[in-house]
Image (tube, rainbow, N blue to C red):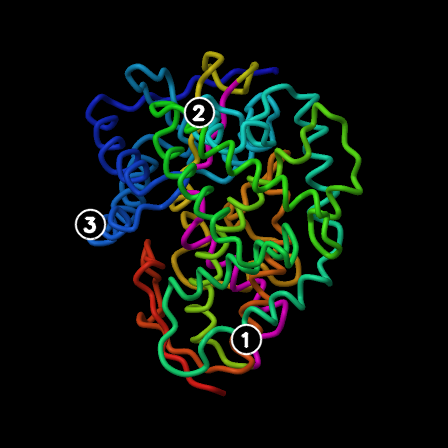
Amino acid sequence: MSTITRLPRVTAEETLALAAAVALPSIAQGPVARRPYAVRLAELADADGRAIRLLARLRAEHGEGPLLVRVPGRGWVILPLAARDVRAVLDDRDFTPAARAKRGALGHFQPDGLLITRDPGLRERRRALNDQVLCSGFAPFARVVEEEAATLPRHGLLTWPRFHATHWRIVRRIVLGDGARDDVILTRQLDRLRADANWSDLRGLRTDVFNAFRRRLAGHLARAEPGSLAAELARAHAAADVHPEGQVPHWLFAFDGAAAAAYRALALAAHQEPAHQGPADLRATVLESVRLWPITITIVREAVGPTEWDVPEGTTAAIYSPYVNRAEPGDSYRPELWRDGGGEWAGVPFSAGFASCAGEDLVLFTAAALLDAVLRERSVRPSVRLEGALPAMLNHFRLNFAVKAA
């Protein structure tokens, strides 16, 4: 690189403020599996709002460039705050997504997953497999969404547990086939491993649960049921070191996060005119849901080579999504950011760059189809009013909808 930039370092006082306002609430809520009680406490404390305001103040005081933070026992952390620097991190292959903390967490249930693959060559082959399977065509999944959406209430109250259970049936059918529709044991096993993953490498692998989960998953994959991702995976014929079956836990994990995005998007869509609820509009609504209330609170990368900044190898780049996604697009509902190609910076709702979410289009298709199926036959009124500047947090665990047949 022609120039190496030295980054401004935050003070010890600012480091403590960042730990209290950004790091600790994010960890407490659960980076891999959300803890409802911690999310509620964060909501009451306006944790995300406080973090956003702190980062805005630090950006005003230190300038537009990234900030460098010294974390005792963890080394250096880069905080990119401006669009240009966020893009620089996510586009630079010398910032690997397989950061140490992420490997410690996701290794609990997907040790062969794409996101925690350190070897660049193997990562490329695993990415190619993910792209091939997850972009293979979505038409068969429309029927699945319609059938499961029909099980949601047409009168009364729609709650998160009811919506979440329905969404999981959709996910199991899309990924593994109709034969996995009612396999709640598989989901509970994954939930248990994800709960352990919240503790990263502080808690050892629960091998009994992991092995039982892997055996159960293998049984579904062996069916390779037509019309499922499992069938596409069987047709892919990837090399043994790619561990095709090892990619599937991440699909289930990521799809589960999409449930919260779809549920929040339903609250946004409830305030829109019917004329603005076509497929493209609903897709934009889901993207706005993820922009405003990110599924992944902090996107983490780790420097494994020279970067444009004067930082040692092993430095972590932490992109705090609640701030980055609102800093320039703002706090209001702006679906136009995603229509007709957008063109304006709108944060990183599905990450970006070479390690962006391989299943983004599939998730958006599924979520938009689910919203369409729900709204076509129902009018819904959320328990919160979403107008003007939208809150930094929207707690999906406590969000309800009054439902009437349309």
For marks 3 and 2 on the same chain, the one whose residue lies earlier in the sequence: 3
Residue 215 included in the magenta stretch of the image: no
Residue 160 location, x and y as percent?
A: 38, 63
- Residues at marks 3 and 1, CA–CA distance in whole angstroms: 37 Å
Mark 2 and mark 3 in contact (Cβ < 8 Å)?
Answer: no
Which label was assigned to residue 104?
A: 2
Amino acid carrying mark 1 in the image: Ala
Above or below, comparing residue 177 to residue 61 in the picture: below
Amino acid carrying mark 3 in the image: Ala
- Residues at marks 3 and 2, CA–CA distance in whole angstroms: 29 Å
Amino acid carrying mark 2 in the image: Gly
Q: Secondary structure at mark 3?
A: loop
Which label was assigned to residue 150?
A: 1
Region of the chain picked out in magenta, as a range = 275-303
For marks 3 and 1 on the same chain, the one whose residue lies earlier in the sequence: 3
The residue lying at 48 percent from left, 31 percent from top is 106
Most extreme residue toward the top is 312
Residue to which mark 3 is pinned? 45
Label 3 or label 2, whichever lies nearer to me, is 2
Most extreme residue toward the bottom is 406
Q: Specify the quadrant of the image occupied by residue 20.
A: top left
Q: Secondary structure at mark 1?
A: loop
